[in-house]
Image (spheres, grey):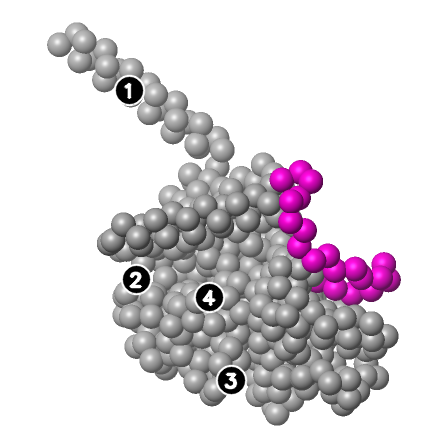
């Protein structure tokens, strides 16, 4: 690299640093970025993230999600010169692509309820912990929630159906192929919901995996793959709405969907997402969502909606994960859980994304035998959990227990057959084990000193 190029790079870096200082750090600022003056009544309609983006570049073309009043037509917006690129089928919203001038037209329109930045949804996995590619103690998560006992007694989810809304699913894997009913790719608008990111495949494997080595919670249940997140693991609000509308379409055409499993989240909700979830709830679909991995006191959306069962994460000893968000209704294994990647390899991943499918699977075991309503599902789960260690009160009830759920819903009489995981969850046992290890340590130390 020549001296001239090096000097040019240094000068460029200094100019950028000076610009950042002049705009953001100097007090008062030496350079003022354009301020966007919105009327006080209009500010409530606007996503602050949009305003901030347009402050930096008012002419930038941005994809905007627009909530509309029920009596508003798309044609009314188009008459204003607004470019509409997507609209709802069952709920009144549209997607608009435009600059700051477009935003001003939207927020000043009395028939526009809210304008959000389209693209606020993300998969809820916990990548900091990484993928531990091991095969030790495979199936510990099924034993922790007693799904193995349910399987031994013939409860496998036959006939029940789940829609997995995620990054798609590699439905060609041997462990998933026989369970696949079809799906749709809302992220790229095509009929093939193939998974590239891997998050959706992992979640689906926990629910319906049915291989020789790897099993899910409801291995005989069927699934739809609805791709609402892109190949990088994030998505648009509009794609989530489209995915929920796709599910509603299937139901309206006589197809069966018992559970919708949603391991994604956003910090803010859209009115149309809530509206569609309420419609699906009213049609008997049980809705399950991941609470989120930020360690916050409240769940992300859609798990935060009243119609959705929010699921937090616990480890193999029943301790609520530090990263797990609060506001969860129940919990399930979500720390180092065995899952499948898009190549069919088993790895251990963490996050409430992986806790959520366990609850979806247990509900499929029940719905395969009895048509319980979503309200009855909430009630059933409140009676079908084990105690957990939850010092921050993040979870309303405990860890899901498949045997308790089946016994309560079906008046069955399955025995739980406690395993070593259950004994270790008992605080008294934990204290005794700790004292035993401590005594053994000192005895070993004294023996070594004496010899």
Asked whether the residues under the numbered discs 4 and 2 touch, taking CB atoms below 8 Å apart as contact, a structural biologist would say no
The residue singled out by tag 3 in the image is 189
- Left or right: residue 216 versus residue 289 is left
Task: Give above or below for 404 relative to 198.
Answer: above
Pointer 4 or 2: first along the chain = 4
Which residue appears farthest toward the left when viewing the image?
A: 451
Distance from disc 1 to disc 4, alpha carbons, whole Å, reads 47 Å
Closer mark to the observer between disc 4 and disc 2: 4
The residue singled out by tag 1 in the image is 441
Q: How far across and how far down the image is residue 258, in percent? A: 58, 76
Dot label at residue 233: 4
Which residue appears farthest toward the bottom when viewing the image?
A: 253
Distance from disc 2 to disc 3, alpha carbons, whole Å, reads 30 Å
Q: How far across and how far down the image is residue 153, in percent? A: 42, 66
Which segment is the magenta one?
A: 26-47
The answer, for residue 197, to whether it is visible in the render is: yes
Which residue appears farthest toward the top when viewing the image?
A: 450
Pointer 2 or 1: first along the chain = 2
Pointer 4 or 3: first along the chain = 3
The residue singled out by tag 2 in the image is 346
Q: Quadrant of the image for the C terminus?
A: top left
């Amino acid at each position: 690299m020549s001296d001239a190029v090096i000097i040019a790079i240094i000068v460029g870096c200094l100019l950028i640093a000076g610009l950042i200082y002049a705009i953001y750090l100097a007090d008062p600022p030496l350079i003022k970025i354009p301020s966007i003056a919105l009327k006080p009544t209009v500010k409530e309609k606007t996503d602050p993230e949009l305003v901030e983006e347009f402050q930096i570049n008012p002419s930038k073309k941005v994809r905007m999600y627009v909530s509309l009043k029920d009596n508003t037509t798309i044609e009314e917006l188009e008459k204003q010169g607004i470019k509409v690129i997507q609209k709802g089928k069952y709920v009144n919203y549209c997607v608009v692509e435009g600059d700051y001038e477009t935003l001003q037209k939207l927020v000043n329109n009395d028939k526009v309820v809210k304008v959000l930045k389209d693209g606020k949804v993300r998969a809820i996995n916990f990548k900091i912990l990484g993928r531990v590619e091991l095969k030790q103690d495979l199936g510990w998560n099924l034993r922790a929630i007693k799904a193995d006992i349910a399987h031994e007694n013939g409860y496998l989810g036959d006939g029940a159906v789940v829609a997995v809304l995620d990054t798609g699913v590699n439905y060609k894997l041997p462990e998933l192929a026989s369970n696949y009913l079809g799906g749709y790719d809302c992220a790229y608008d095509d009929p093939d919901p193939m998974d590239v990111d891997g998050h959706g495949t992992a979640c689906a494997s926990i629910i319906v995996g049915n291989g020789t080595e790897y099993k899910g919670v409801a291995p005989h249940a069927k699934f739809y793959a609805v791709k609402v997140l892109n190949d990088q693991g994030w998505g648009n609000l509009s794609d989530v709405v489209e995915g929920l509308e796709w599910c509603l379409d299937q139901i309206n055409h006589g197809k069966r969907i018992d559970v919708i499993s949603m391991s994604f989240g956003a910090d803010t909700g859209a009115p149309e997402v809530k509206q569609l979830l309420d419609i699906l709830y009213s049609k008997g679909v049980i809705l399950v969502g991941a609470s989120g991995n930020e360690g916050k006191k409240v769940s992300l959306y859609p798990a935060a909606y009243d119609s959705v069962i929010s699921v937090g994460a616990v480890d193999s000893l029943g301790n609520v994960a530090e990263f797990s968000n609060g506001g969860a209704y129940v919990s399930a294994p979500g720390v180092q859980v065995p899952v499948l990647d898009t190549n069919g390899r088993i790895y251990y991943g963490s996050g409430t994304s992986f806790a959520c499918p366990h609850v979806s699977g247990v509900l499929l075991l029940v719905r395969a035998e009895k048509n319980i309503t979503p309200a009855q599902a909430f009630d059933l789960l409140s009676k079908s959990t084990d105690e957990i260690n939850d010092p921050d009160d993040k979870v309303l009830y405990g860890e899901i227990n498949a045997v308790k759920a089946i016994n309560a819903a079906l008046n069955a009489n399955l025995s739980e057959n406690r395993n070593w995981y259950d004994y270790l969850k008992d605080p008294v046992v934990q204290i005794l084990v700790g004292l035993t290890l401590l005594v053994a340590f000192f005895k070993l130390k004294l023996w070594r000193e004496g010899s």
